[in-house]
Image (cartoon, rainbow, N blue to C red):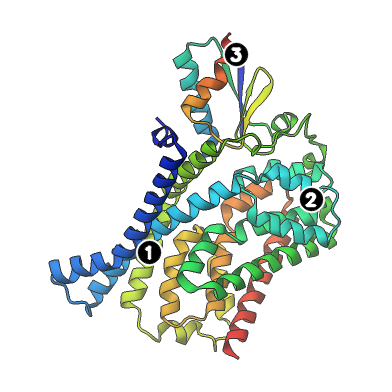
Amino acid sequence: MTVIERLPTSTRGRWFTAAAGAGLWVLAYWVNGWLWDRVLYDVLGMNPDDRLTETIHFFVYDTIKITLLLTGIIFVITVLRSYMSIERTRALLGGKREGVGNVMAAGLGVITPFCSCSAVPAFIGFVAAGVPIGVTLSFLIASPLVNEIAIGMLFTLFGWQVTAVYIGAGLSIAIVAGWVLGKMGVEKWVEPFVFETKLGGQVIDSSAGLTFDQRIQMGVEEVGTILRKIWPYLLVGIGLGAVIHGWVPEDFFTTYAGADNAFGVLVAVGIGIPLYSNAAGIMPMVQALYEKGLPMGTLLAFMMAVVALSLPEMILLRRVLKPQLLAAFVAVVGTGIVVVGYSFNFILAT
Amino acid sequence: MIIKVLGPGCTNCKNLERVTREAVDTLGLDASIEKVEDYAVIMGYGVMSTPALVIDEKVVVSGRVPRPPEMLELLTPATT
């Protein structure tokens, strides 16, 4: 039986269910911190100032909090994004020139539901519709870089200013990097089969004709799918965050990677590129590192490097891009992230 | 009936194949289920969002995995 079939059929019943669900979510989120204070300090009699206690508290509290955040964010975003599709984006981008096209592609990359496993058919479909390579690349950069889960979590953990900077910086990187790569005349570095493959017949719009129930059902399923996929990253991320929170001395990171250190952002990006995690898995670490005084620009650069450039994505893109273009892609995006990190640190410091 | 599951082999493609097989077994259909992983063939159906389901050369689902009840409905008209 699906979730939808269990819901009441009357409109009033549905509103009631939605309100009850939202209420439960808020209650759980609110009670989380209080509950662990009681359990750890009162029931188990642990000392709140003890390092081990702080580490355990961070871990259990953050695990529940981030799972709740993810559930809410993924559900809402999936339902909203079910009204958009890669086919619609393709139609919007078809025939657009470079420049305007890059800007549109980056924006659409953020709101279009897109699984990296569809990167190859999407690439071929865009090229077949006459979308320039550079514009297509803007889309493929923005899609993982400006991650909707990261937006939701940054907003709840750090507020709207940091979130706005993240979105602005991510879009700028996607626009500029796509434009630069397009100007380099990279068509010869795209695998020839991309140009030979034809998109047959009527293009199927995957979002058309869905009922509202189906969209809700998709939201529920997506929560399950993503949580099942990322929970190891999440637990490792929260575990590292907890250890940093409890055990790393206050001045450790500021000495080696503080705002004064000229190589801080470079090192963060260098560590971030080979690391593969999910935006959600990286967030507890970002939070713990921020508490320890690491500058936000360095942390944003680190997060972007982790989510935007990863080995699995490179392997997928390698099927459509020749090694030269793939290398240029990593170099241009990596440079963009470094520039963003330094600029943001500089702006914050002045 | 010829059923084709289009997709390069991601998790959802495997889920779609599983749901399809279960539905075919439930309905007791005489159908062949074929997996299509070649991008050129997938694109040939006008599909950009994988996984997709093709029944008798007609694309019925793209970019998602239908729930078992919906899958039964999708396969039922073909039996009559």
Give the chain of mark 3. B
Badge 2: how crowded within 10 Å, few (<14), some, or many (20+)?
Answer: many
Q: Amino acid at mark 1?
A: Ile
Mark 2 lies on a secondary structure that is helix
Q: Are marks 2 and 1 on the same chain?
A: yes
> Circle 2 is placed at which residue position?
A93
Residue A91 placement (x, y as % from top left): 78, 45
Residue A67 placement (x, y as % from top left): 39, 56
Residue A52 seen: yes
Badge 3: how crowded within 10 Å, few (<14), some, or many (20+)?
Answer: few
Q: Give A38 or A283, whichever is nearer the viewer.
A: A38
| Mark 2–mark 1 CB contact (< 8 Å) | no
Q: Earlier in the sequence, mark 2 or mark 1?
A: 2
> Circle 1 is placed at which residue position?
A238
Badge 1: how crowded within 10 Å, few (<14), some, or many (20+)?
Answer: many
The residue at the point 40 percent across, 54 percent down is A22
Q: Quadrant of residue B51?
A: top right
> Circle 3 is placed at which residue position?
B78
Measure how far apart labels 3 and 2 are at the Cα level. Answer: 37 Å
Q: Are marks 1 and 3 on the same chain?
A: no
Q: Amino acid at mark 2?
A: Leu
> Would you place residue B71 above or below residue A269 in this image?
above
Q: Quadrant of residue A262?
A: bottom right
Measure how far apart labels 1 and 3 are at the Cα level. Answer: 50 Å
Residue A259 placement (x, y as % from top left): 54, 86
Q: Is residue B8 left or right of residue A27?
A: right
The residue at the point 41 percent across, 79 percent down is A291
